[in-house]
Image: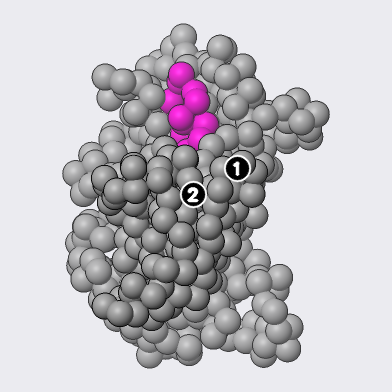
Amino acid sequence: MDITSRSLISLEGLDRNDILGLLRQAFTFEAQPNSKILDGKVVATLFFEPSTRTRLSFETAVNRLGGKVIGFSDAATTSSSKGETLKDTIMMVSNYADLIIMRHYLEGAAKYASEVSPVPIINAGDGANQHPSQTMLDLYSMLKTQGRLDNLEILLVGDLKYGRTVHSMLTAMRFFNPTFHFISPEELKMPAEYKEFCRENHIGFTEHSDFNEKVIANADIIYMTRVQRERFTDLMEYERVKDSFILHNDMLANTKPNLRILHPLPRVNEISQDVDSNPKAYYFQQAKNGLFVREALICNALNLL
Amino acid sequence: MEKKNKSEQLVAAIENGTVIDHIPSDKVFDVVNLLGLTSIATPITIGANLSSHKMGSKGIIKIADRYFSEEECSKLSVIAPNIVLNIIRSYEVIEKKAIPMPDEIKGIVRCCNPMCITNHEPMQTVFHVVDKSSGTLRCRYCGKDIPKNEVKLF
């Protein structure tokens, strides 16, 4: 097999069986998260843009599988701050590592790295573009809590315009016949091209501008995202809507028993603290699931599964 | 037919070279720049705002003693997809080349996304032509779509 083709840059190239296969592997790692399968392997984590959560999750995954980690968490301390090209950094690091996991602030950086690198690349986020491991752990969390990915009723709430996690979810869920509800302020509505994508792939969706008990009554999954002040061109509009897309515990009284609440984290105030103790809150377990999913993605990239 | 003969009289025939026909009138000088015609020493005739049955108004450029490579031609398809290249030898049109839009365009178009890696690394841009009729391009790296009227060349 051509090793470079094992890079994971986005989920677009994966079909239903690829996705379910990786999720099955993640279940195996959840049952037994520690092993020596990466014994003798060196994995580089190159974080040109800071990210505590994703980096720690990937590095924990390598450590728990017996591999060694090299890398950096701040590009300011590397030669890229001296003007070194991404290509040169990748070529240099690929001399030392069997796999490169990278986050970069520029869109398309991971794709380009995968074209120049002799070792596989896992994209841990490239600007506003792709973040495939986050989407895989979102899918894993849905599969784990619902027992299926098919025919789910999913509410996407908050920033649907800039939120890459909600866009990636549409792409990945196209194989599973979901029904989506898009709930957002007017300024942060789901962009037209993604609605067109849903139509082309026969994905049902409804848009809402109100977030209340009624719209969440039939949901299997509520996927919350942050409504960020800096996304608004009209700050008056932000002040008007900022408290309208917050999930409170009393809204959950008449929801379905199987409902689970997801959030890619970090949360600010879009989920009230009083939701945390509700058994339907799942966002902290969701983050934990990232470890098992990333163990599967790393082993898949190294052709060890 | 009479109209066509008149418009042909407006631009002199060439013995050998290339006649670029069916250029949208507002793209004539883009074609001049794209092919670097300002630095060519052989005779060039440029006609703009000529009447055309198909297009209403069109431009035409005749370049003596000069032929163009496939790469140079593909550049033209980005800004003017329906133009026709007539290859002239001894005053005869020996070949008419339409310029179909390629599936992929490498190196000549700049990505309009300032956060795209291609605007920061010394690398070649690559665009997939997602819709040949509208001329919409999609960046291979950042995935952004560029409508035809926003295409910027290097």
User: Which residue in the protein does label 2 denote?
Assistant: B63
Comparing A30 with A107, the one in front is A107
Local crowd size for mark 1, using a 10 Å CA cut-off: few (<14), some (14–19), many (≥20): few
Labels 1 and 2 within one chain: yes
Q: Residue A88's x, y, as percent? A: 63, 23
Name the residue rendered at 58%, 81% in the picture: A187
A120 w.r.t. A42: above or below: below
> Magenta span covers which residues?
A110-123
Q: Residue A26's x, y, as percent? A: 33, 38
Question: Residue B64 got which mark?
Answer: none
Instruction: Give how far apart the Cα atoms at labels 1 and 2 are.
Output: 9 Å
Screen quadrant of the C terminus of chain A:
top left
Name the residue rendered at 66%, 72% in the picture: A231
Q: Are marks 1 and 2 in contact (CB under 8 Å)?
A: yes
User: Which residue in the protein does label 1 denote?
Assistant: B40
For this view, does A233 lie left or right of residue B72? right
Label 1 is placed on what type of residue?
Ile
Q: Residue A240's x, y, as percent? A: 67, 90
Asked whether A114 falls inside the magenta stretch, the response is yes
Asked whether B124 falls inside the magenta stretch, the response is no
For this view, does A261 lie left or right of residue A69? left
